[in-house]
Image (cartoon, rainbow, N blue to C red):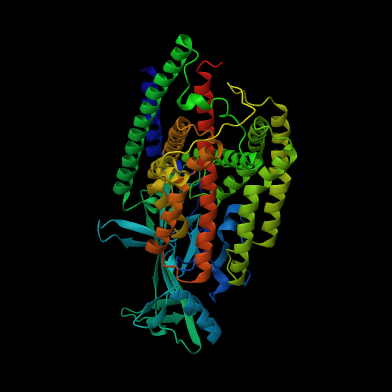
Amino acid sequence: MGRSWLAVRLGLACIALAVHTRHGSGFYIPGVAPNEYKRMDPLEIKAVAMTSVKTQLPFEYYSLPFCEPEDGEIKYKSLNLGEVLRGDRIVNTAYKLNVLEDVPCKVVCTKEWSVKETRAFINRVFEEYIVHMLLDNLPAATVFTNPKTNDKQYEDGFKIGFLYEKAIYINNHLDIVIYYHSIEDVEEGYIYRIVGFEVVPKSLSDKSVEQDKEHCSIAQETDVHPLDKKGKNSVTFSYSVKWKESDVAWASRWDTYLHMSDVQIHWFSICNSIAIVLFLSGILALIIIKTLRKDIARYNKDEELDETLEETGWKLVHGDVFRPPVHPTLLAACLGSGIQIFCMVLIVLLFAMFGMLSPASRGALMTAAIVLFMFMGLFAGYNAARLFKTLKGNNWKKAAALTATLYPGLVFGTGFMLNFFIWGKHSSGAVPFTTMLALLCMWFGISVPLVFCGFFFGYRKQPYEHPVRTNQIPRQVPEGVWYLNPFLSTLIAGVLPFGAVFVEMFFILSAIWENQFYYLFGFLFIVFMILLIACSEVSIVMCYFQLCAENYHWWWRSFFIGGSASYYVLGYSVIYYFSKLEIDSFVPTLLYFGYTGVMIFSFWLLTGTIGFYSTYFFVRRIYGAVKQD
């Protein structure tokens, strides 16, 4: 009873933490102070990149002929590893403003586009590219009203143009609205913090804008600016700025960006999945515990009464259950990689849950994941080495090399091949050569040595102790029943773990492929914990049935059953591609399935490792509970 109450309290604490991390106040690293400005302080709007859900290929801002800064000096901001891998190229723009200074209309520049430049811009409009800008680390957002709920919602970025009745129009005017929060300071008077950054793009013809050097005025009746598809074009870029005071505190300024229209559906789906998985998991655990207690009691009683009674069920294979499997080196490498991924995911989720890896920290999530993965090589090597020695492996150096290179090599090789296609499209998403070298140095300079170090110390440890001895002659495995077929049992086992994650899968895929924010890390942590429980229990249940059928080849089977949810994730990713995305060309399709394949393979290693270790300790426990000759 005490354990049940402790579990309930722990679950309530996790849910409370998940609710707390939904608010914007949890989205800033402790100790980071906001930028504070005085009246007329200069500000500069920076461009991040241009993205499209149709092509999935980001481009830097000046890949199109936009206006350059007045001094002609283009300055790129130094980026972290995550920002580079995302395809961000943060650069200064010609849009300059001063704090609290409203600008009715200001001309940026007039560009004379050649036929080639016009064609490049038209192609980007057809592909529905969106410009992403930053002001005080806040992304520029387009405001729209949800027709179902009439709620005000933000969409990251703004479109560079639009298509209407077979004509192409350019959004050459930006109405910029900046929200600020004022604070009275005793020494400096009022100081101001930026809490909102909205942009309303417009297409204005030259007749709609009356120019007076840098300043301009917009006519009451405006006309749009179409582009000549086959000739040269003269385009005048302009903008206006309006400052509005807001009651929103600086710590809550991301709330409007992270607001979701279907939040009620999201909450209901998450709670429903949690309830179903916990209910089914409880039933499975009850069946296993009740059945096992009867089996153990019967076996022990039979030995006390008559040692000549014939053994049946899972005890019959006690002399073969710990016989080393085929390909022990590969199994140890897969489990080592799974341990490495598990430690990385757990730590990243914990940090993200407390707001340290939020969308406000651009690229921090990916940077932290890569760095942590490299350093978790020590744990991967140690655990893989102990298991490898338990499986009577001899060449530990070969096993260490395979553990250090199997998963990272596949990920790096896939990324390297896809990078060629991205380079061919001249996209900013192509990883620079220097970054590739940096990743290689991290791999061979940090991860590989740590894996070998872990292997060295792990292999010197004693192997895991098994409660029964292994017979010299392997026992023949009888023909199993139909429902224990490896393929069928794997498909059946994957339903329950997939039921725990399919809702979050939708939001994660939307964040990756549809340029949306993902911030419910508290819920994600709870789902991750339920995934661990589900994978562990289905692996144990299927292994128990397999041993009862006198089949002792459970080593690899437990790994595949633990990772069985990944097959459903693969199917869900295919359905998501055809139902939600508008990708219609080869390279974006290749990128989607390439990167999604890497994520699914990572998920397979993670869940397979969870299933294996839970089954392994379960088998050791049940065979240690019965009396042996």
Residue 154, percent from left and from top? 37, 58
**Residue at screen point 35% across, 30% down:** 282
Image location of residue 370, percent across then percent down: 60, 47
Left or right position of 228 against 375: left
Q: Quadrant of residue 148?
A: bottom left
Q: State the image quarter where residue 435 is shown.
A: bottom right
For residue 127, which quarter of the picture? Answer: bottom left
Task: Point out the residue furthest to the top here.
Answer: 305
Residue 455 visible? The answer is: yes
Tell me which residue sits at (58%, 68%) in the image.
427
Looking at the picture, how far across and down is residue 271, in whole percent?
Answer: 32, 40
Q: Is residue 368 left or right of residue 360?
A: right
Q: Position of residue 389 (x, y in %)?
A: 68, 31
Question: Which of the image's four quarters has the C terminus?
Answer: top right
Q: Nearer the viewer, residue 558 or 108?
A: 558
Q: Is residue 364 above or below residue 110?
A: above
